Amino acid sequence: MPKKKTATLFEDSLFELEQLVAQLEQGDISLEESLKAFERGVNLTRTCQKALQEAEQKVQVLIEKNGTQTLEPFTDE
């Protein structure tokens, strides 16, 4: 998936998720609508998590060794 499309997908999903949370917090919708919103929110959360995992895998660290700069995969260690 191209970087721009992934970023847009993440941003759009996050925005929609924020809207759903606000709607649920207001408590102005029926139980059935709340359950549908909750289900949609779970799906959006999974989409966001997947996009973040993909981005994390692409992060690289610029390291200088012996006067030469190289890119290496990012590790949490």
Image: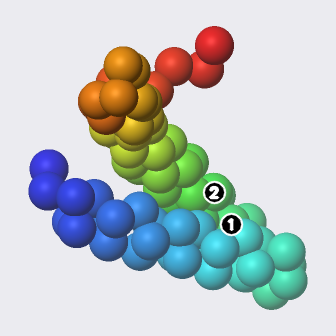
Check disc 2 and give the amino acid type: Phe
Residue 9, horizontal then vertical, whole percent: 32, 65
Check disc 1 and give the amino acid type: Ser
Residue 16 visible within the image: yes
The answer to whether 39 appears left or right of 12 in the picture is: right
Can you tell which of label 2 and label 1 is closer to the viewer? 2
Number of marks:
2
Residue 64 - label: none
Q: Which residue in the structure is indicated by mark 1? A: 34
Q: Farthest residue toward the front? A: 67
Q: Farthest residue toward the right? A: 26
Residue under the image location 85 percent in, 83 percent down: 26
The answer to whether 15 appears left or right of 23 in the picture is: left
Q: Which residue in the structure is indicated by mark 2? A: 38
Local secondary structure at mark 1: helix
Residue density around tag 2, few if under 14, some if 14–19, many if 20 or more, within 10 Å? some
Residue 20, horizontal then vertical, whole percent: 64, 73
Along the line of sight, which residue is nearer the eye, 61 or 43?
A: 61
Residue under the image location 22 percent in, 68 percent down: 4
Residue 59, horizontal then vertical, whole percent: 39, 39
Local secondary structure at mark 2: helix
Q: Farthest residue toward the top? A: 77
Confirm or deny contact between disc 2 and disc 1 (CB under 8 A): yes
Q: How is the image coloured?
A: rainbow
Q: Farthest residue toward the left? A: 2
Along the line of sight, which residue is nearer the eye, 38 or 33?
A: 38
Quarter holding the C terminus is top right
Residue density around tag 1, few if under 14, some if 14–19, many if 20 or more, within 10 Å? some
Marks 2/1: CA–CA distance:
6 Å
The answer to whether 24 appears left or right of 13 in the picture is: right
Residue under the image location 68 percent in, 66 percent down: 34
